[in-house]
Amino acid sequence: MTKRFLYRVAAISFILIVLAQFIRVDRSVPEFNLRDDFIILESVPDQFSQVLKSACYNCHSYQTRYPWYSHVAPVSWWLQNHINHAREHLNFSIWGTYDQETQKHNLEECEEEVSEGFMPLPSYTWLHSEARLTDEERKMLADWFSEMYKNH
């Protein structure tokens, strides 16, 4: 490969990256009722609500806090797609709109995902240390979800 060819590839790549910044992701949030939020509806104790907010709510609610790098394409596209997918599976902001069976199923899934270490995603916790769960927090949260499931 010649230097000229590599220069052209680098220049074209740079131009494409710059142009990609003009393709913005849709971060709009539909209207929702705060009274339907999981933490409010289920009267979640503070010790659990803090863990839920730091480890779960960023992807699984409409209360996403976007970091600076979420404004840079193509990372922004990947991140928003990930959040949209997470909300499709479980959205704590609209918990009250789920029927009883769906709520119960989601509680069971939460217990399973947390206890088996699938959630929060390891790829998420690499950049978000506040979302990392200690073994004690993981067990506490999984046990609490299990208890919620039994009582629902």
Image (spheres, rainbow, N blue to C red):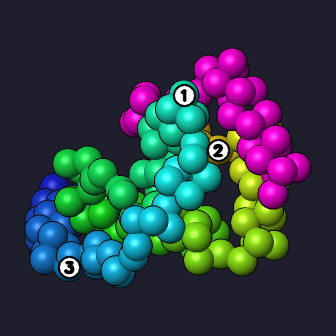
Q: Check residue 147 for magenta coloring.
A: yes
Q: Residue at x 74, y 37 (%)?
A: 144
Would you name the residue on which mark 3 appears?
A: 23
Q: Amino acid at mark 3?
A: Ile
Q: Which quadrant of the figure has residue 103? A: bottom right
Which label is found at residue 119? 2
Query: Looking at the image, is mark 2 or mark 3 earlier in the sequence?
Result: 3
Quadrant in the picture for the C terminus: bottom right
Tell us which disc is closer to us: 2 or 1: 1
Distance between the Cα atoms at labels 2 and 3?
30 Å
> Looking at this view, is 130 or 22 the one in front?
130
Q: Residue at x 58, y 67 (%)?
A: 95
Tell me the magenta residue range.
Answer: 127-152
Quadrant in the picture for the N terminus: bottom left
Tell us which disc is closer to us: 3 or 1: 1
Q: Is residue 120 in view?
A: yes
Q: Whole-percent x and y of residue 143?
A: 79, 34
> Looking at this view, is 14 or 36 the one in front?
36
Distance between the Cα atoms at labels 3 and 1?
40 Å
Please state if 33 lies on the left or on the right of 2 as rendered: right
Q: Secondary structure at mark 2?
A: loop
Instruction: Kindly check if marks 2 and 1 are in contact, taking CB atoms under 8 A apart as contact.
Output: no
Query: Looking at the image, is mark 3 or mark 1 earlier in the sequence?
Result: 3
Q: Whole-percent x and y of residue 78?
A: 41, 65
Q: Whole-percent x and y of residue 28?
A: 28, 77
Q: Main secondary structure of the magenta part?
A: helix
Q: Residue at x 68, y 34 (%)?
A: 141
Q: Secondary structure at mark 1?
A: helix
Which label is found at residue 47? 1
